Amino acid sequence: MAHASQYGSVEKMAEGVNDAELLKEKANKYFKDKDYENAIKYYSEALELNPSNAIYYSNRSLAYLRTECYGYALADATKALDIDKNYIKGYYRRATSNMALGKFKAALKDYETVVRVRPNDKDAKMKYQECNKIVKQKAFERAIASDEIKKSVVDSLDIESMTIEDDYTGPKLEEGKVTLKFMKEMMDWFKEQKKLHRKCAYQILVQVKDLLSKLPSLVEVTLQEAEKMTICGDTHGQYYDLLNIFELNGLPSESNPYLFNGDFVDRGSFSVEVILTLFGFKLLLPDNFYLLRGNHETDNMNQMYGFEGEVKAKYTAQMFQLFSEVFQWLPLAQCINSKILVMHGGLFSEDGVTLEDLRKIERNRQPPDSGPMCDLLWSDPQPQNGRSISKRGVSCQFGPDVTDRFLDQNKLDFIIRSHEVKAEGYEVTHSGKCITVFSAPNYCDQMGNKGAFIRLRGSDLKPEFHQFTAVPHPNVKPMAYANTLMQLGMM
């Protein structure tokens, strides 16, 4: 005979399941409205009430993918499959997470499973073939990489013999040199969605490679008392928002220096225009315009998130190879007045890293999976002390105690980093010692965030925050050139 208490517990469980469903519906609405943070919150609450529901994990995995938390997305997709190994969406999600992390072999295995179970699914078949192609291409690249010295694209270019056709009416370098007149003409030319002549693009790339290769991995600058500097975060191919920054804050000049803190390309579909403009200003103002490498100035990211596809569509595969070479020479960090350290990602997976260690980094390569170079490009702050596994699946998350110890050891006041979308365009954490700045407003045309830049003055080095909103751009969607595997609106 069943006890009343048993009935009570069954009823309570049923109630919990019903409540969880309501929370899931709420989360789905937020997801539909592209409010991924709230979607994640309510999927998490649903999971607390019903932790054995594969669908909730799968849905939260997709929300994490949208917020670029690839490590969390991977964990959730795996959890969904632990609960139900026949849940096909779980394999899709896990494959997408692994693709985003550049783990192509693992992704291929999951796409194989989907194709086996659904042989008539055209989308699955296409993704399997695309992923298989990448795995084979990577294997081929590894095989030829063992050839002693990889030749530079520069060696195979004959820029002098490239002719500029008579019908080209766009900007040209003056005697092979970037001038302010050229920069203004180029920005206007790009604004009208016109293409810079390939000869000019190659001239800029070859010259900027030479310039960057002479710089240290840690750039050190001093702002005099009356001097100022503007620091911008991610721009991600949002060319019209870049022009707006110059509109609001003035064009770069000797008296108006800028530092752009990585992630110039990918996602936004005007990455070529953004990067050629930034490289042009670097050549025009080598000592007053600074560029640091982001995690998107790397081959794996460019292959997935659009820059490689965009360069090939607008120019050639050879030009993308040259961009890749140039990106490897971008410095990794900048120290201002021996007080402020700027990097794209953040601090390190272990204590004890010094500025001297950063000076010694051999940066002319694709970033490794761990170590200081990886951390500078990938890590994120967290509110709690200590370190934890990265939500992105690369590097780590570091707490306020980690920041304090690093700053004390290196006699610094605070760090400025980028790498994360912030609703207000910036965020101050770790008791003011860790500042995030992000300069791509309404990121990917869907996040609704403001953009921001920081102004520092030599007199007090106190950060002044300036916010701005997105401006209209031509009707070319973000990710227009991205790998089809990263079009996330699937299943």
Image (cartoon, helix red, strand yellow):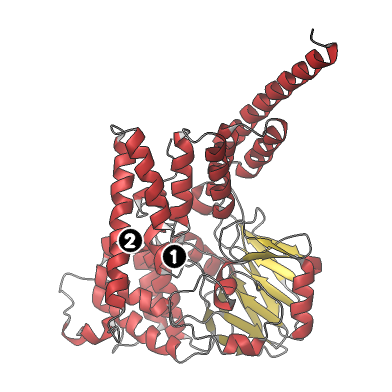
Q: Is residue 171 visible?
A: no
Residue under label 1, please give it: 265
Q: Amino acid at mark 2?
A: Glu
Q: Residues within 10 Å of mark 2 (few under 14, many from 20)?
A: many
Under tag 2, what secondary structure?
Answer: helix
Residue 204: horizontal and vertical position, in percent? Answer: 34, 81
Residue 435's place in the image compared with 282, above or below, is above
Q: Residues within 10 Å of mark 1 (few under 14, many from 20)?
A: many
Residue under label 2, please give it: 310
Residue 194: horizontal and vertical position, in percent? Answer: 30, 63
Question: Residue drawn at (55%, 40%), measured in percent from left and top?
Answer: 82
Residue 215: horizontal and vertical position, in percent? Answer: 49, 90
Q: Is residue 5 visible?
A: yes
Under tag 1, what secondary structure?
Answer: loop
Give whichever of 203, 261 is nearer the camera.
Answer: 261
Q: Quadrant of residue 300?
A: bottom left
Question: Residue drawn at (39%, 60%), measured in percent from left and top?
Answer: 270
Residue 201's place in the image compared with 49, above or below, is below
- Mark 1–mark 2 CB contact (< 8 Å): yes
